């Protein structure tokens, strides 16, 4: 399967393992991952955030309930919401999540945004689990036609050492553990290049803090809601 599908399957497997009720996808783009996750019956709240409203709107109609969702007796409630905003800014609507995914997001952040990102995601949102994926630059020589970066909008691409030292330092500072894995296996004999996509899975080490105490630290709503569906 193509690499993006392998990344989404990785998240689906994680959802199957941890059964989160509230899931947020940061940098959700055209909402493909959210659309896949709406079929996971454990999820009751599904939220997407992207800085670009137009990319979210392209396919967001797929997130509306289908006729069958109304005909079948509802076994669970499901609320899907899309917000336009930046991961460099805190908004109380992102509090109380169990799982936060950041798939191929961080390499699109400006230096100043990347600096704010850990405090927003790990310090403020503080979900039980955070998943971050990003290209492994060591794999680039195996990709045809890649000169500097895989995509012109990438601000950087990290090797495993760079990503892991950033992730370990972030985990240490915000009291999370982190484990590294990836998707996209290198060809036989080239295992030393690592995965094409590197992934860090962060697990919070301390128990859930009360959402109200956290939200007192904020100035209020900064994200703009662009979509909401209640199943
Ligand atoms: N997660 C999706 C996936 O795996 O296909 C999309 C990844 S896309 C390569 C990166 C996305 O991050 C874009 O949709 C972009 O608009 C969004 N983005 C860039 N900077 C952002 C920011 N500061 N806050 C939120 N989203 C941002």
Image (cartoon, rainbow, N blue to C red):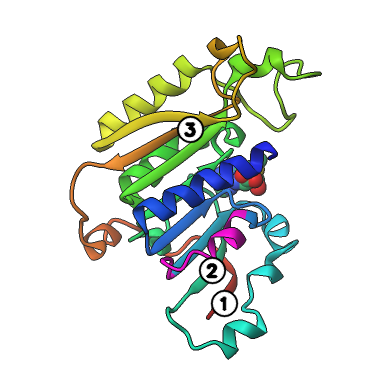
Which callout, 1 or 2, points at the residue further toward the start of the chain? 2
Question: For the residue with label 3, is its CB less than 8 Å from the closest atom of ligand 1?
Answer: no
Name the residue: 65% across, 52% down: 29
Name the residue: 58% across, 31% down: 107
Name the spot of residue 97 as percent of width and height, x first. Answer: 36, 58
Q: Quadrant of ligand 1?
A: top right
- Give left or right: position of 204 versus 121: left
* Helix, strand or loop under label 1: strand
- The residue identified by callout 1 is 229
Instruction: Answer whether residue 20 is visible to the viewer in this image.
Output: yes
- The residue identified by callout 2 is 81
Magenta highlight range: 33-44
Above-or-below relation of 135 to 46:
above
Name the residue: 44% across, 64% down: 221
The residue closer to the viewer here, 139 or 220, is: 139
Which callout, 2 or 3, points at the residue further toward the start of the chain? 2
Q: Residues within 10 Å of mark 3 (few under 14, many from 20)?
A: many
Q: CA distance from mark 1 to mark 2?
A: 7 Å
Q: CA distance from mark 2 to mark 3?
A: 25 Å
* Helix, strand or loop under label 3: strand
Which callout, 3 or 1, points at the residue further toward the start of the chain? 3
Name the spot of residue 1 as percent of width and height, x first. Answer: 68, 40
Name the spot of residue 19 as percent of width and height, x first. Answer: 37, 58
Above-or-below relation of 86 to 80:
above
Q: Are marks 1 and 2 in contact (CB under 8 Å)?
A: yes
Q: Is residue 39 part of the magenta span, yes or no?
A: yes
- Give left or right: position of 167 versus 217: right
The residue closer to the viewer here, 108 or 128, is: 128
Q: Residues within 10 Å of mark 1 (few under 14, many from 20)?
A: some
Q: Is residue 123 part of the magenta span, yes or no?
A: no
The residue closer to the viewer here, 2 or 48, is: 2
């Amino acid at each position: 399967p193509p690499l993006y599908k392998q990344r989404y399957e990785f998240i689906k497997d994680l959802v199957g393992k941890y059964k989160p009720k509230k899931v947020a996808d940061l940098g959700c783009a055209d909402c493909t991952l959210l659309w896949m996750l709406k079929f996971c019956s454990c999820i009751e709240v599904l939220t997407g955030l992207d800085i670009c409203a137009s990319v979210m709107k392209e396919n967001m109609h797929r997130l509306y309930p289908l006729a069958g969702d109304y005909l079948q007796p509802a076994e669970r409630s499901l609320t899907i919401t899309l917000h336009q905003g930046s991961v460099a800014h805190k908004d109380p609507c992102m509090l109380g999540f169990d799982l936060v995914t950041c798939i191929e997001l961080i390499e699109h952040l400006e230096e100043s945004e990347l600096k704010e990102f850990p405090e927003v995601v790990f310090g403020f949102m503080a979900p039980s689990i955070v998943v971050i994926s990003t290209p492994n630059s060591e794999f680039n020589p195996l990709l045809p036609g890649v000169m500097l970066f895989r995509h012109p909008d990438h601000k950087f691409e990290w090797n495993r050492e760079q990503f892991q030292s950033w992730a370990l330092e972030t985990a240490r500072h915000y009291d999370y553990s982190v484990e590294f894995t990836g998707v996209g296996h290198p060809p036989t004999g080239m295992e030393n290049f690592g995965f094409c996509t590197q992934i860090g899975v962060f697990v919070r080490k301390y128990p859930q803090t009360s959402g109200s105490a956290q939200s007192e630290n904020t100035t209020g709503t900064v994200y703009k809601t662009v979509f909401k569906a209640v199943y």
